[in-house]
Image (cartoon, rainbow, N blue to C red):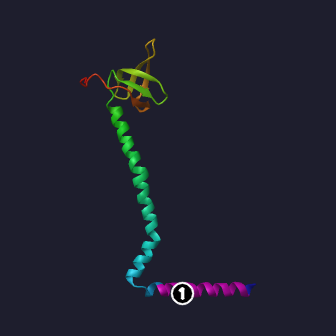
Amino acid sequence: MLNFFSNMMFFLEENAAGATDALSEATPVQQFLSILTTFGPIVLIVIAFYFFLIRPQKKQEKEVQKMRDGIAVGDKVTTIGGITGEVRQIKDDDIYILETGADKSKIAVKKWAIQSKDSISDDTPAK
């Protein structure tokens, strides 16, 4: 059994030495192509992730933030929880007071909890 392991170690040492000799004999172009074929697919995957996942998500986040920043008194909004109401007051540019339902009850909602703006404020001219 000991003979088997010593033969394996000798075989591994010989192959490792042969591989380094072959690599050192390669031209710079061959070395570059070897590195490119090794790391090229990884770089392409990272680029694809950026263009298909990260970039569209950031664009969508900017649009949502722009929509939330454009909310004014009088706009009808829907919260993430599904509550709809009309903005009656804005406190500290972070809390909106919504008037909901037929009984005109008022609730305070954080800015980040607004999902969509359902109508345009009265500042815009009518068509």
Image location (x, y in percent) of residue 83: 47, 24
In the picture, which quadrant includes the C terminus? Answer: top left
Toward the front, the furthest residue is 127
Rendered image quadrant of residue 101: top left
In the picture, which quadrant includes the N terminus? Answer: bottom right
Rendered image quadrant of residue 30: bottom left
Magenta stretch: helix, strand or loop mostly? helix
- Which amino acid type corresponds to the residue marked 1 in the rendered image? Ala
78 or 31, which is in the foreground? 78
Query: Residue visible at 33% across and 36% down?
Result: 66
Query: Residue visible at 46% across and 66% down?
Result: 41
Toward the left, the furthest residue is 125
Image location (x, y in percent) of residue 92: 34, 26
**Secondary structure type for disc 1:** helix
Image location (x, y in percent) of residue 98: 41, 21
19 is within the stretch colored magenta:
yes
Which residue is under mark 1? 17
- As drawn, 41 above or below 96: below
Q: Viewed as shown, does residue 18 lie left or right of 106?
A: right
Residues shaded magenta = 3-22
25 or 101, which is in the foreground? 101
Toward the top, the furthest residue is 103
Q: Viewed as shown, does residue 41 lie left or right of 4?
A: left
Query: Residue visible at 40% across and 77% down?
Result: 32
- As drawn, 54 above or below 15: above
Query: Residue visible at 43% across and 59% down?
Result: 46
- As drawn, 83 above or below 7: above
